[in-house]
Amino acid sequence: MSKKQFIKRHHFIINKLRKKPSTFDEIQDYLKIQSELDEENYEIEIRTFQRDLKEIASLYSIEIEYNRSSKLYQIIQDVNDINNERLVESFELFNALSLTENLSKYIILEKRKPMGTENMFGILHAIKNRFIIQFLHEKYWDEDQDKKTRVVHPLALKESKYRWYLVALDEKDGVIKSFALDRISDIEITLKKFHYPENFNPEIAFQNTFGIVNDGTPAQKIVLSFSFEQGKYIKSLPMHHSQKTIIDNEKELRIELFLQPTYDFAMELLSIGKEVKVLEPKELQNKIKIRFEEAIKRYE
């Protein structure tokens, strides 16, 4: 059996048991249906199934236990964290795109340049082993269009707006910065070691940020009012993990956030246009008003 089939079988078992506890026969019936749909063979013997349960626990931190009284297999511990969910999501997307039938004309992908993910494995290796890395970096807004050599201490990888960024300490000035992977080239992993800063925790560093910018601005309460229509979208896809609903009726959705009012966040609000109004703080409200006034002047 190929690795692809092996992984798919794991996910079928997990999905079946997440819906409800099941007997081995019910799981087998489910695998049989999936086999027919995929024109593959996912059916297994009980011994292989027991081995799968151990591998699922090891790979995905999902514990599956057999209840002798009910004769059901059930998930008793499911970390179900964002990384596992994204892993499953990515695999399901890959599975959909690799169907044997020629369905390409029914799948419309965004036409955009590669995200630089080919460097991910090497960067993660450098982060884990504390290796200094060197690369050429291109800034889009720099008047000098030449790529510049950067020597950095890699600390983390962060995703934002369908882009991946390397969070690293720049040896040039000792400042922690973010570099878009699609603007990095000629990456070299050196054998020089660095000490990971004890006071830096990636999750805490970006806990109160929107996007990739942490400019040191103190996080504060932000209150936004959305139109009823836009509010439905904001409820289904929250802007930030701190989002709390204050008012939700047929006139508006009013939410409260706690984050840094950075440039990235202001740009997000501007992209929503007339469907959102900043109520607090006044400084952010004025900043958005000025941006709209500047945009209007471009049409005069």
Image: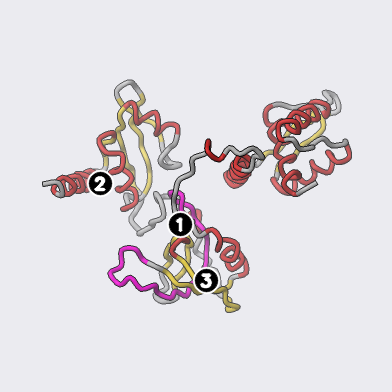
Instruction: Report the front residue among 143 and 179.
Output: 143
Q: Quadrant of residue 229?
A: top left
- Nearer to us of marks 2 and 3 is 3
Which callout, 1 or 2, points at the residue further toward the start of the chain? 1
Chain part drawn in magenta:
139-163
Q: Position of residue 188 (x, y in %)?
A: 54, 74
Evaluate whether residue 46 shows in this view. yes
Q: Which residue is mark 3?
A: 187
**Kind of residue at disc 1:** Ala
28 up-or-down from 86: above or below: above
Q: Which residue is mark 2?
A: 284
Instruction: Report the front residue among 152 and 25.
Output: 25
How far is mark 1 from mark 3, CA to CA? 25 Å
Residue 10 lies left or right of residue 123; in this view the side is right
Q: Position of residue 3 (x, y in %)?
A: 75, 49
**Kind of residue at disc 3:** Ile
For label 1, the crowd category at 10 Å Cα-Cα, with few meaning under 14, some 14 to 19 and many 20 or more, is: few
Tell me, for residue 205, which label it has, or none. 1
Who's the residue at 70% across and 45% down the image? 61
Which callout, 1 or 3, points at the residue further toward the start of the chain? 3
Which callout, 2 or 3, points at the residue further toward the start of the chain? 3
Q: Secondary structure at mark 1?
A: helix
